[in-house]
Image: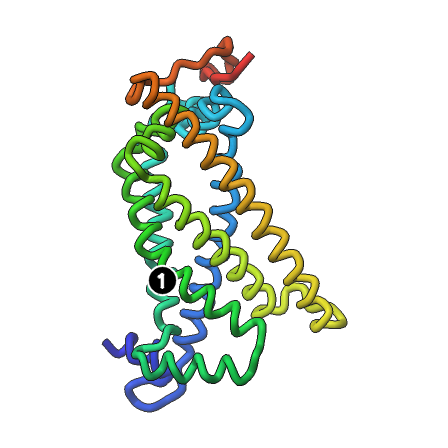
Amino acid sequence: MSDLIEGYLGKTVEGKKSRLPAKLDFIQSFTGGFLGLFMWAHMLLVSSILVSKDFMYTVTKLLEGSFIFEGGNPLLVTIVAIVIFVIFIVHAALGMRKLPGNFKQYQIIKAHSKSMNHDDTKLWFIQAFTGFAMFFMGSVHLFIIMTHSDQIGPYASSDRVWSEYMWPLYILLLLAVEFHGTIGLYRLCVKWGWFDGENPKATRKALKKVKWALTVFFLVLGFASLAAYMKIGMENAKNGTVGKKYEPTAQVIEYKITNKSVGGIA
């Protein structure tokens, strides 16, 4: 309980100034930066469907450790999802410390933001709102991955998106993730002064342009990928093949590495 008091008030129970808030801020920054970079990598992997079904299948098998286990092992994906979920919860819990505790506090912050008319303060509001939404939507997505890691692939993922009506959730989650993530990484750079240089003001303007460019890029990539999964899902529903396991059409070759076989596409 004393640690909780220190985290919120910045003072120990004896009334001395505490270093705990600074430590919690660092952990929040670290977990946020890690999750932001992970989501970009995740988006690039998910977008493999835009190349081909076979390519997405191969990427999935590589993530399942097909270079170690024959045919891959979905348990690896489950373990990664659990680790990400724990980091996600820690980051969310630390972020909640900075949200208004009641409606009156929210009104004060909103009035203060309006009087300042400061762009970065507006970005904070967007980040806070999207972060709150992500806590619920992201938890649903991670739970599905943790409990159904064996149902990831060109057909299985597409059927989940379309036939299980997950596409509305993924549209909202995509918007929340990309806005929250890019704003968060931008604010990390500003907060810790990583790219200040000789003219921090000019650097901040440049960082903001990069932030918006990344937001647009990953939103376009994300919606294009989602559309591809929806198209495949619609085709499966129309053809009555929902739930069918995907079989790669490309010739699969095996590379021998220290008596381990690695799947690839010829």
Looking at the image, is 74 positioned above or below residue 104? above
Quarter holding the N terminus is bottom left
Pick the residue in front: 228 or 239. 239
- Residue at 45% x, 37% y: name it: 226
Location of residue 240 (image quadrant): top left
What crowding class fits label 1: few (fewer than 14 Cα within 10 Å), some (14-19), or many (20 or more)? some
Q: Secondary structure at mark 1?
A: helix
Callout 1, which amino acid? Phe
- What x and y, as percent, mark residue 111? 45, 83
Q: Is residue 32 above or below residue 201?
A: above
Residue 14, percent across and down? Answer: 30, 89
In this orientation, which residue lies closer to the viewer: 248 or 197? 248
- Viewer-proximal residue, 231 or 18? 231
**In the figure, is residue 187 to the left or right of 138?**
right
| Among the 4 quarters of the image, the one containing residue 188 | bottom right
Q: Is residue 151 above or below residue 115?
A: above
Residue under pointer 1: 132
Residue at figure coordinates x 70%, y 62% from the top left: 206
